[in-house]
Image (spheres, grey):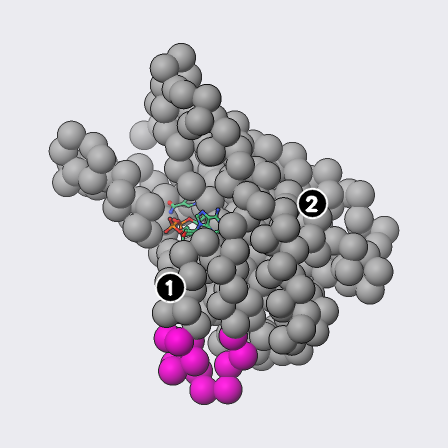
């Protein structure tokens, strides 16, 4: 408890899934929190749920589209007005765009990069000037194990997620002298609506679910709370020398050659 006391944080895509779990964990650790989310109603609902579970929690839901730089800047301004300078940004908002490279539309390509890579950059550049000026800040980018490994048929999502790691490393190095840390988390399969949507899109959803659970050596997939705990750590003062790095949360799956 209180590991983020006194800190002001923004979490993008905080209306559900991993982002909502991070929002709950940050509030439980004492952060004042802006939930920056495309779906304003889900952000409001998550903020209400946090307020009920944790009386005294300071939350603000701000409808935000991470593909629009001005929208993210407005969320940062709202956070500053409500709570003060932003100490932590979690760039979590993301979408799956899984297509065949040669039949994929231009719109699929642009949609993927607009959310999964431009969205992360829009977040970073909205908070970096203030963090650099104050010589303090932690940015946590939610990448994916698709940032290191390729699953056929998932193009161009892994290309964008590789970019998130590149952006994390580049900005982590650029702003290290200013004491601003930029790190990534690479989750493997985590049980969220996104994962259920993917299972449901397969010809046999139940077989797809069972096959996914068999993949990690621990024979289960991750929970959003397990990603949130690592986000708390990276955002906190417990990780002052972790920078330009990535923590994988996949139960060991990416270390496995084959069984
Ligand atoms: N679930 C997994 O297995 C998994 C694995 C690896 C990485 N990830 C990554 O974790 C992040 C969260 O995934 P999730 O499973 O919780 O997804 P989710 O679909 O459950 O939640 C994503 C949230 O982001 C919001 N969002 C989408 N576009 C947005 C935009 N333009 N602006 C603001 N908000 C927007 C959605 O409304 C939603 O609330 C994503 O970056 C995803 O790529 C997920």
Q: Which is in the foreground here, disc 2 or disc 1?
A: 1
Indicate the position of residue 32 as horizontal and vertical percent values. Answer: 58, 75
Circle 1 residues within 10 Å: few <14, some 14–19, many ≥20: some
Real-space Cα distance between discs 2 and 1? 34 Å
Circle 2 residues within 10 Å: few <14, some 14–19, many ≥20: many
Secondary structure state at the residue bearing disc 2: loop
Which residue is at the front of the view, 246 or 134? 134
Indicate the position of residue 131 as horizontal and vertical percent values. Answer: 77, 59
Which residue is at the front of the view, 190 or 100? 100
Give the quadrant of the C terminus: top left
196 left or right, relative to 174 = left
Indicate the position of residue 237 as horizontal and vertical percent values. Answer: 68, 67
Label 2 lies in ligand 1 vicinity (Cβ under 8 Å): no
184 left or right, relative to 105 = right
Q: Which residue was labeled with disc 1?
A: 41
Label 1 lies in ligand 1 vicinity (Cβ under 8 Å): no
Indicate the position of residue 141 as horizontal and vertical percent values. Answer: 58, 48
Secondary structure state at the residue bearing disc 1: helix
Mark yes or no: residue 114 visible: yes
Give the residue drawn at x 73%, y 43%.
171
Residue 190 in magenta stretch: no
């Amino acid at each position: 408890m209180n590991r983020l006391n006194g800190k002001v944080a923004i979490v993008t895509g905080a209306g559900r899934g991993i982002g909502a779990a991070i929002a709950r964990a940050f509030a439980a650790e004492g952060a004042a929190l802006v939930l920056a989310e495309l779906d304003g109603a889900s952000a409001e609902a998550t903020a209400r749920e946090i307020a009920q579970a944790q009386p005294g929690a300071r939350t603000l839901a701000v409808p935000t589209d991470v593909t629009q730089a001005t929208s993210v800047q407005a969320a940062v301004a709202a956070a500053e007005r409500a709570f003060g300078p932003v100490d932590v940004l979690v760039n979590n908002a993301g979408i799956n765009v899984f297509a065949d490279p040669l039949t994929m539309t231009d719109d699929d390509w642009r949609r993927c990069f607009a959310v999964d890579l431009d969205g992360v950059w829009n977040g970073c550049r909205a908070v970096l000037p203030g963090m650099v000026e104050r010589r303090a800040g932690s940015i946590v980018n939610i990448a994916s194990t698709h940032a290191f490994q390729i699953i056929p048929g998932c193009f161009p999502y892994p290309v964008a997620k590789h970019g998130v790691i590149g952006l994390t490393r580049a900005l982590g190095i650029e702003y290290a002298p200013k004491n601003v840390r930029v790190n990534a988390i690479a989750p493997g399969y985590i049980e969220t609506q996104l994962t259920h949507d993917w299972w449901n899109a397969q010809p046999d959803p139940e077989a797809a679910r069972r096959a996914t659970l068999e993949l990690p050596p621990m024979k289960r997939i991750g929970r959003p709370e397990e990603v949130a705990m690592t986000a708390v750590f990276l955002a906190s003062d417990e990780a002052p020398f972790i920078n330009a790095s990535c923590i994988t949360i996949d139960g060991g799956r990416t270390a496995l050659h084959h069984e």
